[in-house]
Image (spheres, helix red, strand yellow):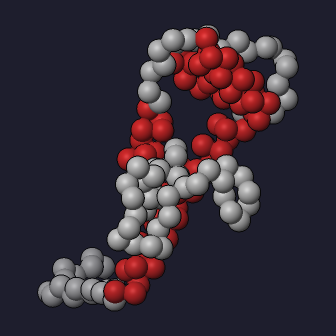
């Protein structure tokens, strides 16, 4: 026997509250972070992929990163070798291009490269008569005894 055509349409609607929407939004964010971080961690743990990445960074800066085949068992060893070669390059070159990674980090978090150059550090050339609680640096740290 054929099924009769419906004579009315019943619509069901499920409405979520604000807290349920926030839970779903947080769950989606966690899922997206997991989808991005899993391949990134796999890339960082693979020595050959990190060799390609360090080679690309070295090419951008203008020097050749010499990868010793079979010498690296971890990416940390490769990173340490890369930093040694990069410091050697900085010591030998006259003009060094500004670091774009530190520029991006400084845009996000100001004064991250030099945390002591903040706006609250007193300027030793300006006498601080108005505020007796602000003292210019004297050349040594009174608490730790190290130079400022």
- Residue 116 seen: yes
- Picture residue at 80% right of the left edge, 14% below the top: 69
Q: Position of residue 135 (x, y in %)?
A: 50, 64
Residue 70 vertical position relative to residue 123 in the rendered view, above or below = above
* 46, 105: nearer the viewer: 105
- Picture residue at 48% right of the left edge, 73% below the top: 133
Q: Residue furthest left?
A: 7
Going by the image, does 4 lie left or right of 117?
A: left
Residue 133 vertical position relative to residue 147 in the rendered view, above or below = below
Residue 115 vertical position relative to residue 62 in the rendered view, above or below = below
* 128, 75: nearer the viewer: 128
Q: Quadrant of residue 54?
A: top right
Q: Position of residue 144 (x, y in %)?
A: 73, 60
- Count of number-bearing discs: 0
- Picture residue at 45% right of the left edge, 52% below the top: 124
Residue 142 vertical position relative to residue 36 in the rendered view, above or below = below
Q: Position of residue 114 (x, y in %)?
A: 52, 46
Going by the image, does 17 lie left or right of 62?
A: left
* 80, 55: nearer the viewer: 80
- Picture residue at 70% right of the left edge, 12% below the top: 66
**Quadrant into which the N terminus falls:** bottom left
* 18, 95: nearer the viewer: 95
Q: Quadrant of residue 53?
A: top right
Q: Position of residue 56 (x, y in %)?
A: 55, 20
- Residue 52 seen: no
């Amino acid at each position: 026997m054929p099924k009769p055509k419906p004579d009315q349409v019943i619509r069901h609607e499920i409405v979520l509250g604000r807290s349920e929407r926030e839970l779903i939004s947080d769950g989606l964010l966690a899922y997206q972070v997991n989808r991005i971080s899993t391949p990134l961690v796999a890339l960082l743990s693979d020595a050959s992929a990190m060799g390609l990445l360090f080679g690309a960074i070295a090419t951008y800066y203008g020097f050749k990163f010499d990868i010793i085949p079979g010498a690296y068992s971890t990416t940390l060893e490769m990173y340490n070798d890369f930093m040694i070669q990069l410091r050697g390059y900085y010591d030998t070159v006259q003009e060094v291009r500004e670091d774009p990674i530190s520029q991006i980090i400084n845009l996000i978090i100001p004064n991250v490269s030099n945390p002591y150059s903040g706006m609250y550090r007193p300027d030793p050339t300006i006498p601080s008569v108005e505020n007796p609680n602000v003292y210019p640096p004297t050349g040594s740290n009174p608490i730790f005894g190290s130079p400022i």
